Amino acid sequence: MQSFSDRLRSARIMKGWSLQELADNLDFSLSKQALNKYELGEMKPTEEVLRALSVALGVKPDFFLRTSNIQLGKIEFRKSPKLSVKEVDSVKEKVIEFLERYLEVEQLLNLDCSFEKPLTDIVYKPEEVDQLVSKLNIKWSIGFDPISSVIALLEEKGIRVLEMDLPEEFDGLSTYVGKIPVIVISKNYTIERKRFTALHELGHLILNIHPEADKERICHAFAGAMLLPDNCLEKLIGEKRKNIAIGELVRIKEQFGISVQAIMMRAQLKGIITYYHTLSFWRMIKQNKKEEGLGQYNGVEKCYRFEHLVLRLAAEEVVSLSKAASLAGMKLSEFRKLLDAA
């Protein structure tokens, strides 16, 4: 159970501030030493101090009064080396805060949160992934056509997908809260990167990867196989190639929602083309990692479930509008507009 001191520390870490930085940004005279006493639980705040902390840290006053027992399980966290320890801690605290609200909404609606891992096979190498994806497609009744919305599929299968405003250096995060699977992606990604990252993190959640195997390569292969399943790629470009035109890759990207880089990696993994024959492609794409001007998938990748559940809470008057707005992480005026579709 969290106390005010825990909540204060959490809000400060979310902001990415030290105690001194918090003191410097307060519209109230409080020293670093006094703030430290609050975080140690040696002092209790007055209402005036609580309001000042709320404004400075960008949270509502009731944030400090909420309690939470959320503990993230083992975290698969992909990030650039440029992401500092302070930024990593900030991301983790933001994820916990979002999950607190998400799970509270589910509890208020008495929703079943159960999830069962669909695969049991142990994976040793990327080449084994295609067979597992075929099993998963059958078990989850996905089929072998392009996945129109990866996020919608994952949410339908009981996975909590959080889209958050996160640093460019953040790649993806997956974990369990108890038995509840969670995937975090950045809302600032391109649509193809959202799709690939979400499925890569799904791999971390549901694949039983041997401890000595290369997890990242296997999860990359898994994401590619989910987006281009079975023998789709061979049917599109043939079984053996010495060169693949960039225009071919762009057409596949627009149809299947997978980046041209991921398509080429999948072609190499499946032995359609050798690395030697792709060298010119990799030299070219190195200058355009974001694939600007190289087509775009026209589908939609957005997390709808959480927002829908909060609107349902308000519509059925399970909680007050102000409480629903707080759970949604919105101002009351913003939430009213969303509720009324104004």
Image (cartoon, helix red, strand yellow):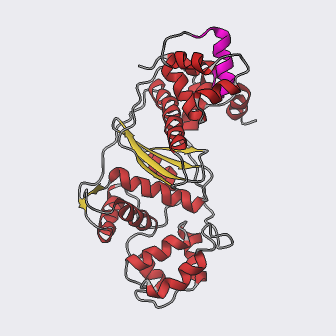
Relative vertical location of residue 43 with respect to residue 307 in this rendering, above or below:
above
Q: Nearer the viewer, residue 41 or 337?
A: 41
Q: Residue at x 28, y 57 (%)?
A: 209
What residue appears at the point 61 percent right and 59 percent down from the top-left corner?
Answer: 190
Q: Position of 338 compared to 117: left or right?
A: right
Q: Which residues are magenta?
A: 45-60
Q: Quadrant of the N terminus?
A: top left
192 shown above or below 305 = below
Quadrant including the C terminus: top right
Residue 179 pos. (x, y %): 33, 38
User: Where does residue 11 sit, x and y in percent of width and height?
Assistant: 57, 28
Within the magenta stretch, is there residue 94? no
The residue positioned 58% from the left and 74% from the top of the image is 286
Extreme right residue here? 342
196 displayed left or right of 205: right
- Judged left or right of residue 55, residue 175 is left
Q: Quadrant of residue 175?
A: top left
| Residue 168: image location, x then y, percent | 60, 53
Picture quadrant of residue 194: bottom right
- Towards the viewer: 159 or 276: 276
